[in-house]
Amino acid sequence: MTASSHNAPSSGQMPTGAPLEEALAEWSDILGAERVQRLSAAEPRYTATTLPNAPLPSAALKPGTSEEVVEIVKVAARHGVPLYPISRGRNWGYGDARPAMEGQVLVDLAGMNRILDYDETLASVTIEPGVSQGQLSDFLREQGDRLWMDCTGAGPQASVVGNVLERGFGHSLYGNRVQQIACLEAVLADGRVLRTGFGHYREAQSHKVFADGLGPALQGLFAQSNFGIVTRLTLWLMPRPERLQVALLSAEDPDDLPAIVELLRGLRLGKTLRSVVHIGNDLRVLSGMTGRAHLQAPWESGLTAEARTALRARYGMGAWTLSAGLYGTAQEVKAARSVVGRTLRGPGRRLLYLDRKRLGLAKRALAGLKWTGLGAGLREKLEAAEAVIDLHSGKPSARFLKGAYWRHRHPPAGDLPAEADPALDGCGIMWLAPVLPMTGVATRQILDLIEPLFARFGFDPLVTFSTVNERALAAVLTVAFDREDAAERDRARDCHDALLDAVLSAGFPPYRVGLRGMGRLEAGSETFWPIVRSLKLALDPGGIIAPGRYDGRPEGEK
Amino acid sequence: MTASSHNAPSSGQMPTGAPLEEALAEWSDILGAERVQRLSAAEPRYTATTLPNAPLPSAALKPGTSEEVVEIVKVAARHGVPLYPISRGRNWGYGDARPAMEGQVLVDLAGMNRILDYDETLASVTIEPGVSQGQLSDFLREQGDRLWMDCTGAGPQASVVGNVLERGFGHSLYGNRVQQIACLEAVLADGRVLRTGFGHYREAQSHKVFADGLGPALQGLFAQSNFGIVTRLTLWLMPRPERLQVALLSAEDPDDLPAIVELLRGLRLGKTLRSVVHIGNDLRVLSGMTGRAHLQAPWESGLTAEARTALRARYGMGAWTLSAGLYGTAQEVKAARSVVGRTLRGPGRRLLYLDRKRLGLAKRALAGLKWTGLGAGLREKLEAAEAVIDLHSGKPSARFLKGAYWRHRHPPAGDLPAEADPALDGCGIMWLAPVLPMTGVATRQILDLIEPLFARFGFDPLVTFSTVNERALAAVLTVAFDREDAAERDRARDCHDALLDAVLSAGFPPYRVGLRGMGRLEAGSETFWPIVRSLKLALDPGGIIAPGRYDGRPEGEK
């Protein structure tokens, strides 16, 4: 079997005319006409995108159950019509609700939003792909707030399952979310339903507590892939700790980061810090507070070093801001704080701790100051602090989406509402997330690689680094652009591509890619992607499920 | 494609005569005649087994490099001769060095024992399958003992890679060993070499720090499977903590275990206890100290409850003994100890802490007592305590293998030597390891299920429970039998089968199986195993690599 014959059956070419029409008619019979939308009548959510451009679907289907997904897949296979599953379509900055290739039929799982099982004893929950961060968080609060989810900065509307399957990471002890999957259910291209771990044993009592099961572990096949449509996920939750404190470190000197990373590695490897630590540069932090359009600075080019220094002074922030959650009993948190303080304190650095108690005291103090007028500006800071604690306790907020509006011509002045949608709002963003060893040297190397590229293309380098495990950092680079400006859209695309090529050549592949990156996965790789395609062929010989998605085929072959 | 056609090409039928002879001739050309052993001239290590019976290989090959493994596989594919890779063949109680099916040709990787990379900064090591626990532990000590491996009780001779790929677990923070794989290299049936994670990117700098890589995670396919021959593993190591203490809890009452498990779950979920906690029953602990043949008790049946009570009194041990490593800074360990003590102490329980410092003091005190004669028996206890601390610090010891000699007619009186080999020594053991939720109810259910079965077949129930993660216990049941007694061999096999059927029907599948269990994987399962076989067919259409191993085919179809 040659490499090209591997590709042939799953070329993903979209049939037009008769096959699509016939499939649409059959899907209407199954789902009812109102749950089958042609592109011409599709909701804006399916067509809006934060990217410069992206493939358009030809239709969208809205199943309500796993059984309907099975029927959808069988029709697709019969007519050779490629599908593209989305959980809730909030994959902003990577692909939104758009498919990997032109004309694929969206399977929108947003209507499958049941919380199927909640196990307080074993601290797990079983959810469908339509469950949003906000929905799960509210549900857990209603159950007494005894279990916390891990949440990301993507806001209340984003799907939990969708983000976990992209290996998104949050801020808590359970921040490496894909590691918290106990088992999942996936519908395969031939309509078979697979349950991973121990989930396929009919009488299983241990499927919620042990992910590997018996025999080869198939779970990893369903993250960042096109091997099936995941319809159910059992996820582990964190028992609410006796105490949560968030350590906030601010570093004045832009060149201090490599030294901080060296110290962090010790704290992470030694397990004093056990959660995902996030570090943002000045611009990334600023983008959460205000839009670029609100600043007194030339619009056409990136902010200068001088402008950034002035902004740091004005907003009272450092070149780098680090946040780390400390979880445990009061005594354990105290012990950790002592190690963290001893390790991280140094000249040019400020370290402080936030928790609900301190926040409550500050609020009462603020209320007492009200009549004096001295509290102005403080309220905003307290609200921001509260959102940070919320995020570390599994309570999502739209606040952290605000960075997506950085290059928007008319960014919101105040807080974003819970239902904010950067794609519908016309934001332009492309995210790129290279992984690097948690060393000062690698951190310096990444910064030296990317900062000149941002400058060359005239964009502001919005950058975060997160300790996704004990040894690795994921950098998240935001190319924020003005979507209304056609030339800037092109520049953003070119900047993204230059950044991706640079990190790939330097040996720092990203932990995930957006639709734009799907065509470049094979660059510099040996053997892996052809093997992925062999496995795909075994499970989906007709190429029905999301061809072009994480299958390593170069752009030209799609 | 029907289910039976899935099986057809990989039926695993062993060709005899010409194909095998031709393949052996070609392998001799590649490896030299001295590294190709026919069964008639094979080392006893390849034929000795701890099981009642097991398939015999027809030959054994001893490659020295990955490249030789590639050549071996190509010859096997050409002649349709099935291979069975073993790392070091010390899979005692599960299969030793024996293949899954009669006549398969062993690929013994023991000669591939290089430590290819040692990264002190990122705390990782890259090793070949022939590297033993003892070799890696010694190597790390020579490097300054700054990084600790996780080790199991299987002794210095066992392969690290082999055990990790069976998802064996140890005692430390890194006890869930399969989670500590950064990337691996595997030779596939067609001779292609796959590297997982970021390892397939030629310039990768992050392959040692992030396991999932980009796109589907294939790593899970190579544990407990027959998808390839793993020739290299990069494993994460634990930085030596400032402090290690081992908490030892002894519980008098045999019925106290469910309550202890309930408390443990809180400690594990709350991350006060972060390592694998082991709990052994009286017989399991006793089997580490003495053989059944040394006891004054009828040989033909299991020990009675009265006999067990008397033995507990005589050896000063409880019905259950728990050991848990506490790792961290002195302050962190102190904080953890305070929570552990507060939680676990209770009537009928004794809690004490071991560490190197206390051990040193005790040793000096003992030396001072020498002339009085009062120290008799104390030295043994101190040595046992030292071995427990060693085990928690990644220093393996043959001491914990002693349980394999429980039903041996002539068990060793003193310590086992480092090179002890229960298979060569004629021990009879079958291990069975069901996974259960970490609840008192499930623990009670397992005990109620298995104890009567051990009694029915006349064997002593040697039982441990280990917290393999925050929510699951793996029970390890030992059916120890007298291998010299043909009738007892049969009874042991029947006892094993009855136990396996019981735990499967009750919904507690094991986390791994031995050769005897391979034929029962599909009982009660839906969809999973046929999908495993589809994937196998995609990677190994000729069924060259270990057919019958973790592929779910029932006994009769092999």
Image (cartoon, coloured by chain):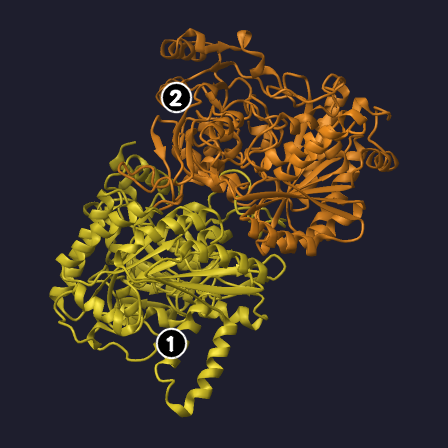
Chain colours: A yellow, B orange
Q: Residues within 10 Å of mark 2 (few under 14, many from 20)?
A: many
Is residue B11 positioned above or below B345 on the image? Answer: above
**Residue at image mark 2:** B69
**Residue at image mark 1:** A381
Cα–Cα span, label 1 and label 2: 62 Å
Residue B150 location, x and y as percent?
Answer: 53, 36
In terms of secondary structure, where does tag 2 sit?
Answer: helix
- The quadrant in which the N terminus of chain B is found is top left
* Residue A225 visible in this rendered orientation of the protein: no
In terms of secondary structure, where does tag 1 sit?
Answer: helix
Amino acid residing under circle 1: Lys
Q: Which of the 4 quarters of the picture holds residue A4? A: top left
Indicate left or right for B85 with B426 as reference.
left
Indicate left or right for A123 with B125 as reference.
right
> In the image shown, does A35 or B76 lie closer to the viewer?
B76
* Residue A45 visible in this rendered orientation of the protein: yes
Amino acid residing under circle 2: Val
Residue at 60% x, 30% y: name it: B514
Residue A42 location, x and y as percent?
Answer: 29, 70
- Give the chain letter at badge 2: B
Residue A432 location, x and y as percent?
Answer: 27, 55
Residue B455 location, x and y as percent?
Answer: 81, 34
Callout 1 and callout 2 share a chain: no
> In the image shown, does B115 or A492 lie closer to the viewer?
B115
- Give the chain letter at badge 1: A
